[in-house]
Amino acid sequence: PIILFVGLAINQDAFNVVESRHIPAAIIGLFPQTADWILSIWPGAPEAKPGLAAMSYGALVVCIIWTSMGIFLIDRRFVQAGIWAMVASCLAGLGLIHQAEADLTFKTYSGSETQPFGRSPAAFQLGYMTLALLFGVLRILQNCGCSRVPPERKEVDENDAEKEAEVVAERCNERPQTRIFDAMMSNEVAAGYEEQEDSEGGESTDEGELRP
């Protein structure tokens, strides 16, 4: 329970600091670690749920990779996303992620008698390489100005943000004020009311003097 509480507190702090647009990527990054937690409390889960087990192997590294790819995809920075996909491809080929144990001899690279090709290091490496290729194609379309691929999102510098705020403030101050606002901020209305009251008072006095 203490470890769970600490983990929830860390996640709460992370979600408070992260940009709102990057929250989906942060949530995706929790999937591998959640799968690892499910396997720890579910007897016989690796044999019953091989896909869940593959997600849980190397969960910490997989969390970092998936979150990084998600963030760069949200910002439409396909080159950086492709680099992370290639890193994941190398790690998957070595069996450091998505495998119960690493195989640096590549004896089980394409599968074994107890492990089909779909859960082998080669399959995961091929999948990440396909993602890297897809990100590369999106980058090419982005450079060509394709309307289907929006431009890369650029980070706003703090100095630029302050300058932009100053420009907006200057524009607001230079904007011509409306006649209603001028009337509310000036004393012309009150003076008009006083003149009107004086004139009405003078007319009533004159009428009283004319009466017998």
Image (cartoon, rainbow, N blue to C red):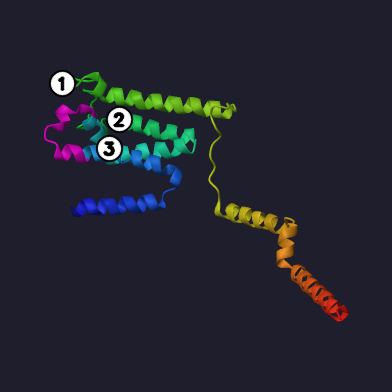
> Measured along the vertical axis of the image, is residue 125 above or below residue 74?
above
Marks 3 and 1 sit apart, C-alpha to C-alpha, by 23 Å
Secondary element under disc 2, as helix, strand or loop, is helix
Q: Which residue is mark 3?
A: 32
Residue ID for mark 2 = 92
Which residue of the protein is positioned furthest toward the right in this rendering?
210
Residue 76 position within the rendered picture, expressed as x and y whole percent measured from the top left = 49, 35
Magenta part of the chain:
37-51
| Residue 48 is inside the magenta segment | yes
Name the residue tied to disc 1: 114
- Placement of 152 over or under 13, stated as above or below: above
The residue that appears at 60% across and 28% down in the rendered structure is 145
Instruction: Identify the residue shown where x is 53% and y is 45%.
Output: 155
Q: Of 64 and 7, which appears nearest the observer?
A: 7
Tell which of 51 and 204 is nearer to you: 204
- The residue tagged with tag 3: helix, strand or loop? helix
Mark pair 2, 1: CA separation: 18 Å
User: Do residues under tags 3 and 2 come within 8 Å of each other at their CB atoms?
Assistant: no
* Sequence-wise first label, 2 or 1: 2
Q: Is residue 184 visible?
A: yes
- Magenta stretch, main secondary structure, is helix
Question: How many tags in the picture?
Answer: 3
Q: Is residue 196 magenta?
A: no
